[in-house]
Image (tube, grey):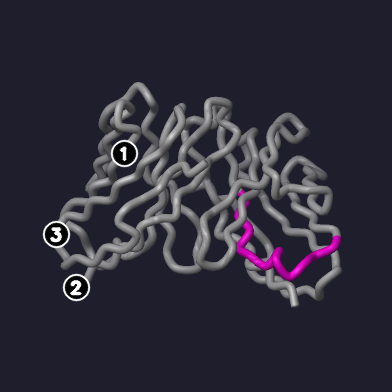
Amino acid sequence: EPEVTQTPSHQVTQMGQEVILRCVPISNHLYFYWYRQILGQKVEFLVSFYNNEISEKSEIFDDQFSVERPDGSNFTLKIRSTKLEDSAMYFCASSAVDPFYGYTFGSGTRLTVV
Amino acid sequence: SQQGEEDPQALSIQEGENATMNCSYKTSINNLQWYRQNSGRGLVHLILIRSNEREKHSGRLRVTLDTSKKSSSLLITASRAADTASYFCAKGNNAGNMLTFGGGTRLMVKP
């Protein structure tokens, strides 16, 4: 069964450093998403991406965050200057032509900011 | 606003019993989705039910949607120890761009 692949599975970074989280969505999917889950809290929407541009973003997704689809397969989330409160599990997801058929999530990247 | 709030927050049952989890929401939805998450792992899509549907089945899973009450339920029949996980409902907005997750129900199935 097709999978969404995320790397790395765990990243530790110093506060103030830039991090890039990587995702390879399912190849024929057209919609891409990032969500995050702070330990013990709800899964929160960050951003959706379609047709090479952001289609929707949450209040969490401020100027410190950016997304990119640098080639035909990767989808990245960049955090420019990490804060302690950015520590969370970050999930990438993708959906097919019609997003109403449900998303496929990756297994996540656990980001720890120290 | 709170969307996709589940209850109970935690549920412990014996293997073979049925587990019912409920989800409420406040504003209109296009669809409601249920996901499963094993501890520290990713989210696995279980079922999507559209706003014009009332019930859907998938194996041992049954989901109902009552748009008049703005609520949904997930029933797992004949539960197994392997069903132990957290279960989340997520509201799909009309644009289909984002999901709003609830806090989840932690299900423990004792062998």
Q: What residue type is labelled 2?
A: Pro
* Drawn side of residue B89 relative to residue A11, left or right: left
The residue singled out by tag 2 in the image is B111
The correct choice, above or below, for A91 with respect to A70 in the image is below
- Residue A83 within the segment the image draws in magenta: yes
The correct choice, above or below, for B91 with respect to A61 in the image is above
The residue singled out by tag 3 in the image is B17
Q: Mark 2 lies on which chain?
A: B
Q: Is mark 2 on a helix, strand or loop?
A: loop
* Drawn side of residue B99 relative to residue B80, left or right: right
**Spatial distance from mark 1 to mark 2, Cα to Cα?**
27 Å
Tell me where the magenta segment starts and ends, as one range.
A81-92
Q: Find residue B89 and report its horizontal and vertical position in percent.
A: 41, 46
The correct choice, above or below, for A89 with respect to A68 in the image is below
- Residue A108 within the segment the image draws in magenta: no
Q: Find residue B87 and report its horizontal and vertical position in percent.
A: 37, 55
Q: What residue type is labelled 3?
A: Glu
Q: Which chain carries label 3?
A: B
**Spatial distance from mark 2 to mark 3, Cα to Cα?**
11 Å
The residue singled out by tag 1 in the image is B72
Residues tagged 1 and 2 counted as in contact (Cβ below 8 A): no
